[in-house]
Amino acid sequence: MNKPKKRRLLVPREEIAWFPVIDTEACNGCGDCESFCRPGVFSPGEKVGPKRPKMTVSSPYNCVVLCERCAPKCTSGAITLPDSEDFERFVEYVEA
């Protein structure tokens, strides 16, 4: 049985611009991204009017580099991530 590989960053996390972007026009404020994301990247924005607040990327550098799990969970399609191929150079894979 093969052990899963663990990612190790080759530069400090703050030097890697890997994090989600939320299209505020598309976001319906459901909060699924906040509930789903264990590192705590998302939080509700300012409440304006009677609708739910739009979600924000409040802690972008908490995002795990090359993690893409949040985008498919977004029912409104408001979350996008950078192209992962552009960020592979910042990561090496080591035995877990």
Image (cartoon, rainbow, N blue to C red):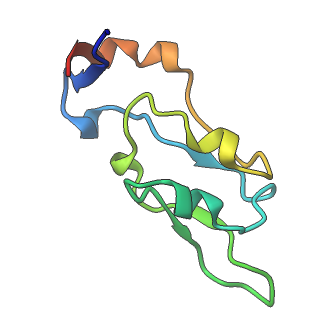
Asked where in the image residue 34 lies, by quadrant, the reply is: bottom right
- Horizontal arrangement in the rendering, residue 13 relative to residue 26 (left or right): left
- Horizontal arrangement in the rendering, residue 7 relative to residue 54 (left or right): left
The count of marks equals: 0
Farthest residue, direction front: 1
Farthest residue, direction bottom: 50
Residue 36 spot, x, y in % from top left: 54, 56
- Horizontal arrangement in the rendering, residue 49 relative to residue 95 (left or right): right
Query: In the depicted view, which residue is nearer to us: 1 or 3?
Result: 1
Q: Quadrant of the N terminus?
A: top left
| Residue at 57% across, 72% down | 44
Residue 50 spot, x, y in % from top left: 80, 90
- Please say if 57 is above or below 95: below
Query: In the depicted view, which residue is nearer to us: 49 or 70?
Result: 70
Residue 87 spot, x, y in % from top left: 41, 19
Residue 33 spot, x, y in % from top left: 59, 57
Query: In the depicted view, which residue is nearer to us: 88 or 34?
Result: 34
Asked where in the image residue 20 lies, by quadrant, the reply is: top right
| Residue at 20% across, 22% down | 96
| Residue at 41% across, 59% down | 40
- Please say if 7 is above or below 88: below
| Residue at 43% across, 34% down | 18
Asked where in the image residue 81 lies, by quadrant, the reply is: top right
- Horizontal arrangement in the rendering, residue 38 relative to residue 49 (left or right): left
